[in-house]
Image (spheres, coloured by chain):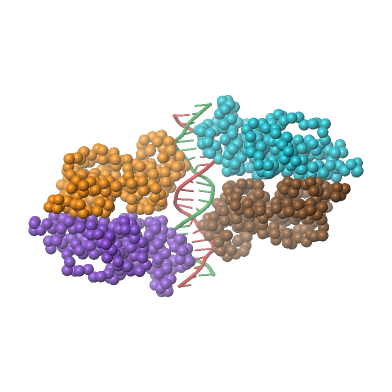
Chain colours: A cyan, B brown, C orange, D purple, E red, F green
Amino acid sequence: MPKDTFYNLPQDKRQRILIIAVTEFAANPYDVASISEIVRKAGIAKGSFYQYFEDKKDLYHTLIEYATEEKRALLEKLPVPDVNGDLFSYFRYQFLANVIFEVHHPRLAQIIFRAFVEEVPFPEMTEELRRRGTTQFFKQLISQGILHGDVAHWVDPDMAAFMLETVFYQFGKYFINRLGLTNTEDLDLSLFEDDQAQQLMDNLMEIIEAGMKANPENR
Amino acid sequence: MPKDTFYNLPQDKRQRILIIAVTEFAANPYDVASISEIVRKAGIAKGSFYQYFEDKKDLYHTLIEYATEEKRALLEKLPVPDVNGDLFSYFRYQFLANVIFEVHHPRLAQIIFRAFVEEVPFPEMTEELRRRGTTQFFKQLISQGILHGDVAHWVDPDMAAFMLETVFYQFGKYFINRLGLTNTEDLDLSLFEDDQAQQLMDNLMEIIEAGMKANPENR
Amino acid sequence: MPKDTFYNLPQDKRQRILIIAVTEFAANPYDVASISEIVRKAGIAKGSFYQYFEDKKDLYHTLIEYATEEKRALLEKLPVPDVNGDLFSYFRYQFLANVIFEVHHPRLAQIIFRAFVEEVPFPEMTEELRRRGTTQFFKQLISQGILHGDVAHWVDPDMAAFMLETVFYQFGKYFINRLGLTNTEDLDLSLFEDDQAQQLMDNLMEIIEAGMKANPENR
Amino acid sequence: MPKDTFYNLPQDKRQRILIIAVTEFAANPYDVASISEIVRKAGIAKGSFYQYFEDKKDLYHTLIEYATEEKRALLEKLPVPDVNGDLFSYFRYQFLANVIFEVHHPRLAQIIFRAFVEEVPFPEMTEELRRRGTTQFFKQLISQGILHGDVAHWVDPDMAAFMLETVFYQFGKYFINRLGLTNTEDLDLSLFEDDQAQQLMDNLMEIIEAGMKANPENR
DNA sequence: CATGAATGAGGGTTCATTCAT
DNA sequence: AATGAATGAACCCTCATTCAT
């Protein structure tokens, strides 16, 4: 909930402030991220900052929203997944999309990652993020998968969702390091086609699928 | 490398300071953890702290060593795993031991976790920890598992090790939350016998095993 | 390189802070001079100080520049020396001007003196001051004096310059003590006319002149 | 006035402590010199230090005495000056002895220098040193020189003494730098014979002599 | 007599936030 | 709406000195 003044800003200025703030909060834990540093880099007055945002917390909240929104927006631009496909190819799509997001917006991804893994001083905020987030999403999919006979009936949906989510949030960085990817400005979907990337993706998904899928003989 | 002064302290005082420091560094990232807060809680003079430790970094280093040592010590007390068992029962033992450590020393576990996941301002220190740590350990086990025919030949050892490690470091906290466990002073191995715990453990390990084990038909 | 903040200050406040800082750095070596003491006396917040100056070093640098500038400014106001006069009357002018500066700005003079005689923790800064300073100035004058036949040919210019400079930087304080002079706010040139002062001045300069001047018989 | 305990120390230990303290006080102004650093380097207990000396001031006082005594002792070892020689050859002897002292004991010389040039927080101590010191010494010699007809009658003895003393205390360092001398452990009187050194010495003394000596024609 | 732990004031510096202009 | 000066608490760290053992 930044103030109206922020939204009334010329778009490029608003964007510049956001990006600088993103960089700061991606590089540092909440308490270490410095408003002073942000206004210094952005070349705006300290006072101006407090006319845009209530306080540090407000900015942080804005960044979380921004990151979430950017991620959603990117997902929309991706080729629609084959909805006829089974659950696991849908998982595959989710993981790949996540990697693409990390490649394109590593700092936003880092902020989201911090929100999950660190104690941000506002439990209520990240708690909500987590609820809205992937935990429930994965849990529901798995539960449905069990009902539909895609996922083995003995799988604990909550546990499996935890596991998926955990890997989900760390996989991007691993992927980038492993393949030596670098940030690209433009939306670049070649990942969908790169062989090495595909194989690594496949490898992960096959383990997950083999681990959780219903045994046909037991049906 | 704390100073002798620290080791010459009466054991209970030394322990008290350590525990308070552990609590502080478990609750906060390195830069946020406050020496002032520690001495305040410990009821010692600021100057005294610097008679014990070179500086903040020295204390942090001490805590990392302490946590590592406590973990090693606890592992030694656990029932020896069935070395004749296969790879996956060994994994199970590792994961269980880790959970036990987290239940007994949640704050120490948290410090280790931070060292892995956060940017501590001393790359060299955590880098060593990571090398000594679990990544290589898991990777080697998996590679050997492939050679021995326990693990499917198509599994990418590096990727699988990443996956295991990721889950490994987060599973403890999930486990504790899920089962509503609380810290116990004494070494309590009832986890090995608790039904609910066993089932959850089994569930995770079965997914992992099913996901990675060699398909007998393919041998 | 103080920040703009400092130069934007009302002139009297800026001046007050400068004077208090000058007093502190005149009374103490660099490491002993205390920012805390300065802000205490100036009645400003610690944080404000750091809005004005980068750090302690920045303040010190400012004071050096300030002192140098004040000296230059005072020299400009003095009656132009008789350029037709010989070398030694020019020396006399220099020494007298220096004494006048010390009488008017004893604390600034003291800061400059410290920069020469103490180990300030920034060799580069005082080194530059020294280069810009009097050593080369005196050495050149003496070398030229030898060429022109004013100074005895056997005089070692470097050594003589050292000697002159040494006396130059200490003479002011001696003069003040000897004559019981006190600081005067206004530019007071009566020194040029005071008999006792003139005689003392003459005495010093005559020794110097007799010591170095070329012997007419040897020409 | 160190305590008896200090003088009861084994000579080598006492000496070691002294030397380390000398090094510290030569390298830093009084307030910056650190007792903590001294006991650290000397490998003695903090408490022990305070059984040897009343406090920091007491140590400093001891160092001043020590330096003065060492200087006196060295002077005694030097070849007796030609007492039949005139005043200026006696000055020459004094200056040369001083340089020899600085070459052999640069840190002691530095401490004495600091006592003259810096504001040590105990005016009474350095004031006494100064009184006992060279100022009066030079002044008396000059006054007598005037009576004996060696020094020009117009010379102001106090002023001339100031001038001599000033050069006297700085000449050593200049000399060392100029000739690239380095500290020598053993008493080394080759300075008395080195040509370059002799010439530099001569140059200085000739200026002084020519500057102050009585003009035969005016007698 | 030697030890070294304990002290707390003080050092320079950064911070998020306020508010008058 | 924009500014940026002012604030003071908090940070890590060092100091000379004391005193119980």
Q: Position of residue D103 (x, y in %)?
A: 33, 63
Quadrant in the rendering for residue B188: bottom right
Specify whether residue D14 is in view: yes
Q: Is residue A166 left or right of residue D192?
A: right
Q: Is residue C113 left or right of residue A135?
A: left
Name the residue at 60% across, 48% down: B120
Name the residue at 31% across, 46% down: C133
Quadrant in the rendering for residue A108: top right
Quadrant in the rendering for residue C190: top left
Q: Is residue B193 left or right of residue B49?
A: right
Q: Position of residue C215 (x, y in %)?
A: 15, 52
Name the residue at 36% across, 46% down: C128
Q: Is residue D104 left or right of residue B179?
A: left
Q: Nearer the viewer, residue B54 or B140?
A: B140
Q: Nearer the viewer, residue D171 or D48?
A: D171
Q: Nearer the viewer, residue D63 or D58?
A: D63
Q: Nearer the viewer, residue D39 or D187?
A: D187
Q: Position of residue D122 (x, y in %)?
A: 34, 58
Q: Is residue C75 above or below residue B39?
A: above
User: Looking at the image, how many numbered discs can be counted on the residues?
Assistant: 0
Specify whether residue D140 is in view: no
Q: Is residue E18 above or below residue A156?
A: above
Q: Position of residue C210 (x, y in %)?
A: 17, 53
Q: Is residue C185 above or below residue D88?
A: above
Identify the image quadrant of the N terminus of chain B. Answer: bottom right
Name the residue at 85% across, 39% down: A150
